[in-house]
Image (cartoon, rainbow, N blue to C red):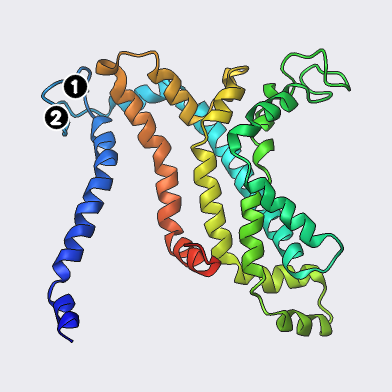
């Protein structure tokens, strides 16, 4: 009883720890935001000033000019939306099939999908790149994938193909759909409902929080993808996305003068992720709870 009263009397300690942790986590973002408004020569000067002394909006207009932010932003939007939509569709349909349909080899297929999650992503970079380079009948290649100039790496599709299906997404959706009562589906089958109607009208609405959680994870991961995009962009600079374009410019600039422009580009690239996460945050938390993730 005394311990319970002590916990009630000292909530300020928990609140203080949470507040301090929140401030520490927000500091890098706030520094990035304020640095995007600094004038030339302010960044990196000692003593360091957290707030801009010469507040200016010109860094954002310069970001669109020097970073070609419009093209980079459009590439990022196209790739991220297509990949996210594909992962949601394929994961939901495959998850339903593996959870609720009975067919020969179902468990073997599911174990194979689990096995793909064990492979480090870096292990597949070179094989995937070689497949893109030797893709038949694309980029000047013949039917054997030879004789061309880059193959599929000359097309924006190469940024999406390796990520259109997600083993983790299928696993996540399947684990949730296993918990949907079979009695509900059997009752609908007796009433004449087909498998597509069961999936679309009964199972999918219940899986909405988990699907939104998977969509957020996929969106953020694909939006911030750097390694695969930089590998493809090395053969065609027109395929660069925001993370690659910003990092490339950062490697060839004087940080004391033009780093605020880079910070402005990073702020712009961060805004879509923040908006989407804040808008779907309640579904994300609910999806994590329903899917049993720790």
Residue 22 relative to residue 109: left or right: left
Q: How many marks?
A: 2
Task: Measure the C-alpha gap from mark 1 to mark 2.
Answer: 8 Å
Q: In which quarter of the image is residue 183?
A: bottom right
Q: Where is residue 235 in the image (x, y as percent from the top left)?
A: 62, 17
Depth order, front residue of 73/32? 32
Image height of 8 relative to 270, above or below: below
- Residue 119, numbered circle: none
Query: Which numbered tag is attached to residue 49?
Result: 2
> In the figure, residue 119 lies in which quadrant?
top right
Q: Position of residue 66 (x, y in %)?
A: 41, 18
Which of the numbered marks, if any, corresponds to residue 42? 1
Is 50 above or below relative to 106? above
Disc 1 or 2, which lies upstream in sequence? 1
Report whether 170 appears left or right of 106: left
Look at the image and tell me in which quarter the N terminus lies: bottom left
For the point 40% across and 17% down, the residue is: 251
Q: Callout 2: helix, strand or loop?
A: loop
Classify residue 65 as left or right of residue 204: left
Q: Which residue is drawn at 44% across and 64% down?
A: 285
- Quick one: SS at disc 1? loop
Q: Residue 171 falls in which quadrant of the image?
A: bottom right
Residue in front for this viewpoint, 57 or 156: 156
Mark 1 touches mark 2? (CB < 8 Å): yes
Q: Which residue is located at x 83 percent, y 73 percent?
A: 194
């Amino acid at each position: 009883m005394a311990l319970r009263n002590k916990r009630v009397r000292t909530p300020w300690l928990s609140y203080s720890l949470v507040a301090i942790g929140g401030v520490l986590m927000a500091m890098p973002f706030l520094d990035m935001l304020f640095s995007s408004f600094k004038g030339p020569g302010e960044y990196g000067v000692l003593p360091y000033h957290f707030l801009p002394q010469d507040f200016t909006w010109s860094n954002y207009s310069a970001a669109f000019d020097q970073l070609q932010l419009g093209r980079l932003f459009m590439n990022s939007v196209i790739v991220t939306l297509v990949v996210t939509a594909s992962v949601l569709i394929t994961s939901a349909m495959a998850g339903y099939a593996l959870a609720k349909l009975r067919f020969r080899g179902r468990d073997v297929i599911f174990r194979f999908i689990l096995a793909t999650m064990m492979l480090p992503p870096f292990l597949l970079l070179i094989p995937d790149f070689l497949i893109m380079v030797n893709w038949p009948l694309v980029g000047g290649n013949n039917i054997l994938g030879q004789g061309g100039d880059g193959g599929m790496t000359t097309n924006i599709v190469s940024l999406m193909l390796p990520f259109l299906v997600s083993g983790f997404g299928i696993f996540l959706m399947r684990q949730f759909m296993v918990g949907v009562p079979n009695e509900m589906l059997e009752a609908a089958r007796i009433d004449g409902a087909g498998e597509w109607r069961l999936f679309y009208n009964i199972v999918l609405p219940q899986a909405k929080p988990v699907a939104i959680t998977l969509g957020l994870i996929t969106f953020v991961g694909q939006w911030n993808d750097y390694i695969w995009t930089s590998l493809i962009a090395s053969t065609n600079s027109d395929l660069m996305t925001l993370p690659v374009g910003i990092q490339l410019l950062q490697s060839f600039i004087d940080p004391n003068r033009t780093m605020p422009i880079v910070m402005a580009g990073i702020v712009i690239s961060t805004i879509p992720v923040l908006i989407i996460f804040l808008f779907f945050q309640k579904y994300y938390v609910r999806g994590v709870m329903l899917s049993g993730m720790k």
